[in-house]
Image: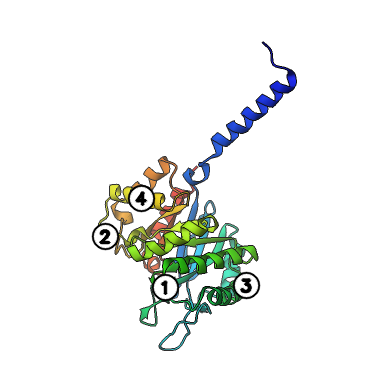
Amino acid sequence: MELPITKLCFTLKIFFILFLASTSVGATPSSSSNIFREYIGAEFNNVKFSDVPINPNVQFHFILSFAIDYDTSSSPSPTNGKFNIFWDTENLSPSQVSSIKSQNSNVKVALSLGGDSVGGGYAYFNPSSVDSWVSNAVSSLTNIIKEYNLDGIDIDYEHFKTDPDTFAECVGKLIKTLKTNGVINFASIAPFDDDQVQSHYLALWKSYGHLIDYVNFQFYAYDKGTSVSQFIDYFNKQSSNYNDGKVLVSFISDESGGLSPDDGFFTACHTLRSQQKLHGIFVWSADDSMKKGFRYEKQSQALLALP
């Protein structure tokens, strides 16, 4: 029995819509990308953007380290979201940001918030209240981001004097407001495998993961001597934790932890790439890589630039 033309057209239309839906679901998190990111400026060893080799065939993000909501006294104290700059501003200035971006159309520059330490002590996330912290953070960071012509932020708090839900609301509302206001184009987080750290970042991910573009997971915080198979297992575990997120792989330049480039990091990258799971690579840090001539930055970008 033949279907009437109108009913046939309607049936075909529904089939086409269902086909598109079935082929698109889950495509984004499982696809590979060519993003390369590098932290810079925390160690004050005179490294400049222009020192770092930039492959034109990757998306390249410099991440200035760090902006911290502490004062700049000899014994720094928390400032409840009023951020100050703690990176090497002499060598990484607003004019140098503009210069590297104008010379390389594939380069964007972000700033990272928090970090491990300030003034010889831990840099704690220590807000007075959600609303006051967010208000201060939006104001102070908007000023810094506009002054430096930056494109995004990275969240790298590693020590906490508040509960996970408060952290999630503060940081989530900050990211949402900066994006809504057009101040930033992307945001990332930088957790590692520690119970307290994970509890805070997973609370943030649960409520605001849809606003977070990249997960800079610190795989180098695992033990030195990590094997390729262990690294792949760690990656799969964290990809499950940060479900649907772009979890980037990483190494540390001084080879003090995790899977080093000399011991199989790029083997692991090729394996993940073959599985369409290599979302990008990031490095801590340009400061330490400079004395090695950025050998592994070149190798990382060459891999990411492969067709």
Q: CA distance from mark 2 to mark 3?
A: 39 Å
The residue depicted at 31 percent of the width and 62 percent of the height is 255
Give the crowd class for mark 1: few <14, some 14-19, many >=20 residues within 10 Å.
some
Q: In this view of the protein, can residue 202 be seen by the observer?
A: yes
Give the crowd class for mark 4: few <14, some 14-19, many >=20 residues within 10 Å.
few
Above/below status of 284 relative to 10: below
Above/below status of 46 relative to 269: below
The residue depicted at 69 percent of the width and 21 percent of the height is 8
Task: Choose the circle earlier in sequence order: 1 or 4.
Answer: 1
Task: Choose the circle earlier in sequence order: 2 or 3.
Answer: 3
Which of 12 and 271 lies nearest the eye of the viewer?
12
Residue type at numbered disc 2: Lys
Q: CA distance from mark 3 to mark 4?
A: 37 Å
Q: CA distance from mark 1 to mark 4?
A: 26 Å
Q: Which mark is residue 237?
A: 4
Q: Please provide percent x and percent y for residue 77.
A: 44, 85
To which residue does mark 2 refer?
Answer: 224
Q: Given this view, does label 2 or label 1 mark the residue nearer the observer?
A: 1
As helix, strand or loop, the secondary structure at mark 3 comes to helix
Q: CA distance from mark 2 to mark 4?
A: 18 Å
To which residue does mark 1 refer?
Answer: 162
The residue depicted at 43 percent of the width and 45 percent of the height is 277
Which of 57 and 173 lies nearest the eye of the viewer?
173
Q: What's the image's color scheme?
A: rainbow
Q: Please provide percent x and percent y for residue 101.
A: 59, 64
Contact between marks 1 and 3 (CB within 8 A): the answer is: no
As helix, strand or loop, the secondary structure at mark 1 comes to loop
The residue at the far left in this view is 225
Task: Choose the circle earlier in sequence order: 3 or 4.
Answer: 3
As helix, strand or loop, the secondary structure at mark 4 comes to helix
